[in-house]
Structure formats: structure tokens, C-alpha cells
Image (cartoon, helix red, strand yellow):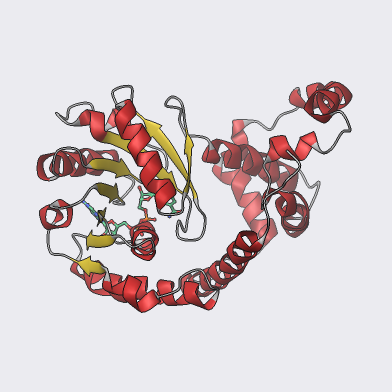
Amino acid sequence: MNAAIIGAGLIGRSWANVFARAGWNVRVWDPEPRQRSAAARLVEESLHELAVHGLVTEPAAAARRVSVVESLQEAVAEAEYVQECGPEVLEVKRSTFEELDAAAPAGTILASSTSAIVASKFTGHLAGRARCIVAHPVNPPHLVSVVELCGAPWTSEDTKRRAREILEAVGQVPIAVKREIDGFILNRLQVALLTEAFRLVQEGYVSPEDLDHTVSDGLGLRWAFMGPFETIELNAPGGIPDYCRRYTPWFRRYMTDLPPASVWDDAQWQRAADAWGRTPSPGKIAAKSVWRDRRLAALVAHKRAQEPSDSD
Ligand SMILES: NC(=O)c1ccc[n+]([C@@H]2O[C@H](COP(=O)([O-])OP(=O)(O)OC[C@H]3O[C@@H](n4cnc5c(N)ncnc54)[C@H](O)[C@@H]3O)[C@@H](O)[C@H]2O)c1
């Protein structure tokens, strides 16, 4: 099986890892020569890092399945699946998808990694628009497996089904966004949490460090293996209906006091950033991202070693 990765930045390289470790041949292209020349080495390093955690058995063989090519056309020529990972700019997505639709064999799925631009904004003018879909990953997709699949109104059911099958086959966890919505699902959840977090810090209820502990040593521990619905099901003996009956009076009160959008005004977010108190250099951020990826790899290895719940 052949995949094409268009754009070899952070996300494109991580997708190359996902397909290569699953046994696919991967052709990677990026318009920037510097990105092209670094891509193969960086993907190989990430495969070896996974091997340390037992998440890839033959990293060198997987790395050999990745080739970096000189044109978009060459990248997609034999691909069954294309994952676009270019800049988050509408005009660039439009023109890239035009090129992809012209160059890719009929039947090839054209998926975009876009974080926030729905497919109907950049695929409607294409003859092959039925094969276009958003497959929004989470950074880095080779360690965080969920992928939000969201079609435009004209995306075919066959494209949605095949995209899901392919992503499952390479070890990702696709979820279906049933119709287009700004921010898809994950970022809407993230923004809801972040907006409240910024408000609580801005208004002096908590320090940013303690707020982070609330997630890393609180909510996030359960969320690493169960979502909010499954979580609340276990928080009342009678499951979700019992939970809702007990807590909704309080939740309703709280809903009348939600943070306003002005939490994101420059002067407001700056207050939270000041409270955080540090802006690490890009080098430090890169180093800490390596640390994060190691922790994630260990967590993924732990999750894989666990038995699924047998109580359902
Ligand atoms: N970084 C994240 O956390 C994250 C998470 C999920 C989705 N995404 C999405 O993935 C996509 C890529 O993001 P990234 O973080 O890898 O960005 P990035 O800046 O690291 O990489 C973008 C790459 O695209 C290349 N590029 C420039 N013009 C191009 C073109 N016309 N065609 C193809 N490639 C081109 C650049 O040279 C660069 O290598 C974006 O749409 C982004 O919204 C990012």
C-alpha cells in the first residue's frame, strides 16, 4: 500500500511515521528543500524512538519504506491515500487540493490535516470533490492516535468508509464528525476547557501551575483511558441518568456564569501569560517536546499492555 504525505513539517513527518511503521510505502514531498532534506532523518529518528518503547519492532525497515520525492505529482502517482499537511492557510489548501485532484489516480483518497478549515471551504470546485475529506490529527499523530474524520456535504460515503478503514488499519483511532462544525470536536472541547482555565487564572482563583495539576493529576488521569461520558457513568451508582439528576441543578447555575469571549482579548490572555511567568526559547520548547513524546510513548505502551474493560 502507498501513502503520500504532502508537507513535511511537524505533522507531515509524524504521519509518515504512522504509515511506514504500519508497513505502507510512503512518499513525502514538501516545497521547501530544507524540509525535504531533513524529513527522512527526522522520521527515522522518531521510528527508533518508538522502538525504545516497544511500539515499533523494525524501525530501520520502516524508515526504508519512506522516500522523499521532488514533486507533488511524484508523491501521489501511486498513492491509495494522500495526507495533506501544508500550512493552515485557506488559499494554500485550495490550490494544493487542486493540484492533488489533478495528479492523484482516480479513487485515491485526498485527506487534509487541517485543524480548523472545513473541507467545503477548499474542495467544492474540484471534479473529484467526493474523494476529499478532513482527517484532523492531534500532535503528534504517531503517538496520539485519534483522527477526526469530517467530510464536506459532497464527500462520498465510500470515501468516509475507506478513510476510516485505512486509518484503523494503520493503528489510528478515527472518529466521525457527522457534519461540518468550526473546530471539529476535539478543539471545541479544548477551547471550552482553555477558556475556563484562562478565566480562572485571570480572575485570580488559581495559579496556572495549580490549574495544570488539576488536569495532569486529576481529570487527565482518567481521560488517558476513558472519556467524559464513561467517566461520569462511574461517578454515580445509577450511571449517567443518576449523575445528571444529582448534579444538573448545580451545572445549570454554573452555566449562567460562563467565561466570556473577552477572556481572549490581548490584555486578558496576557494576564494569564504573565501569571505563568516564563516564555521558553524555541530550543527549550523543542527539547521539552522530545520529553513529552517520550512520556507519551511510555503511556501508549502502557495502554497497549492493558486488557480492555470486560465489564460491559
Ligand atoms: N501542529 C499541530 O499541533 C497540528 C495538529 C493538528 C493538525 N495540524 C495541521 O497540520 C497542518 C500542518 O501543520 P504543521 O504543524 O505540520 O505545520 P509546519 O509549519 O510544521 O509544516 C508545514 C509544512 O508545509 C510546507 N508547505 C509550505 N507550503 C506548502 C504547500 N503549498 N504544499 C505543501 N506543503 C507546503 C512547509 O514547508 C512546511 O514544511 C496544518 O494544516 C495544521 O493546522 C497541526
- The quarter of the picture where residue 221 lies is bottom right
Relative height, residue 30 to residue 281 (above, below): above
**Residue farthest toward the front in the current orientation of the protein:** 310
Give the side of residue 201 with respect to residue 157, left or right: right
Measured as percent of width and height from the top left, residue 175 is found at 49, 38
Give the side of residue 40 with respect to residue 117, left or right: left
Task: Please name whichever residue, 35 or 16, is drawn nearer the observer in this view of the structure.
Answer: 16
- The quarter of the picture where residue 23 lies is bottom left
Give the side of residue 239 with respect to residue 99, left or right: right
Work out which quarter of the rendered image holds the C terminus and state it. top right
Give the side of residue 73 with respect to residue 194, left or right: left
Task: Please name whichever residue, 258 or 18, is drawn nearer the observer in this view of the structure.
Answer: 18
Q: Is residue 144 visible?
A: yes
- The quarter of the picture where residue 142 lies is bottom left
Measured as percent of width and height from the top left, residue 300 is found at 59, 62
At 47% from the left edge and 31% from the top edge, which residue is drawn?
Answer: 177
At 59% from the left edge and 32% from the top edge, which residue is drawn?
Answer: 261
Relative height, residue 309 to residue 128 (above, below): below
Task: Please name whichever residue, 15 or 305, is drawn nearer the observer in this view of the structure.
Answer: 305
Task: Please name whichever residue, 111 or 22, is drawn nearer the observer in this view of the structure.
Answer: 22
Measured as percent of width and height from the top left, residue 284 is found at 52, 74
For the image, the number of numbered tags is 0
At 22% from the left edge and 38% from the top edge, which residue is drawn?
Answer: 94
At 12% from the left edge and 64% from the top edge, which residue is drawn?
Answer: 70
Q: Is residue 114 visible?
A: no
Q: Which quadrant does ligand 1 occupy?
A: bottom left
Measured as percent of width and height from the top left, residue 255 is found at 74, 24
Work out which quarter of the rendered image holds the N terminus and state it. bottom left
